[in-house]
Image (cartoon, rainbow, N blue to C red):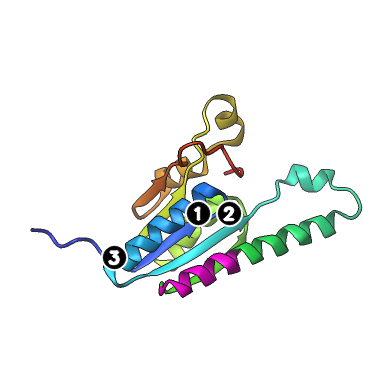
Amino acid sequence: MTEARRFETILVATDFSPTADRALAAARELVLAAGSGEIVLAHAKFVPREVEALAVYGAEKVFAQIEKAAVEQLDKRLAELVQAGVPARQVHVDGRPSEVILDLARREGADLIVMGTHGRTGLSHVLLGSVAERVVRQAVCPVMTVPPGKGASGGASG
């Protein structure tokens, strides 16, 4: 019988949606079941150039509030992991989510990437693209995708 693969470094991408939280729970269970490993909880802060170009006076305050909320959400999820006995740390990086995830996976030497999918189809998929799809196609390590739960909507952009 083959020994189960152990994932020492699991990169979990989050946009703070319910689906991303399901992905984080799945990664937490992997670490707890293996009795080893570390979760690197990652969030990409991305503001499209078009939005920056349209920003009016005072936009800096809005962006600062968004940044503060993201850091608070990361801190909350990190504290929950630590309380559950899961070794974890967080990173918050500016950039396109798929590029940030792929770069972090390489830099951190991730053995696994875990992320939620939003299940977009049709025009919303064409317009918004799929972060998960790009990551699956270009990752240098296995990628575990977690679909939305029953009754879940598309959630945050990905």
Horizontal and vertical percent for residue 8? 33, 69
Q: Residue at x 81, y 45 (%)?
A: 53
Neighbor class of circle 2 (other Cα within 10 Å; few <14, some 14-19, many 20+) is some
Is residue 141 in view? yes
Extreme-left residue of the structure: 1
Left or right, 43 with respect to 28, comes to right
Marks 1 and 2 in Cβ contact (< 8 Å): yes
In the image, what residue type sits under mark 1? Asp
Is residue 110 in view? no
Q: How many marks?
A: 3
Secondary structure state at the residue bearing disc 2: loop
Q: Identify the residue position indicated by label 3 in the image.
A: 33
Q: Residue at x 46, y 38 (%)?
A: 150
Q: Is residue 107 magenta?
A: no
The mark nearer the N terminus, 2 or 3, is 2
Horizontal and vertical percent for residue 64? 77, 62
Neighbor class of circle 3 (other Cα within 10 Å; few <14, some 14-19, many 20+) is few
The mark nearer the N terminus, 1 or 3, is 1
The residues colored magenta run 74-85
The answer for how far apart the CA atoms under marks 1 and 2 are is 7 Å
In the image, what residue type sits under mark 3? Ala
The mark nearer the N terminus, 1 or 2, is 2
Secondary structure state at the residue bearing disc 1: helix
Q: Identify the residue position indicated by label 2 in the image.
A: 16
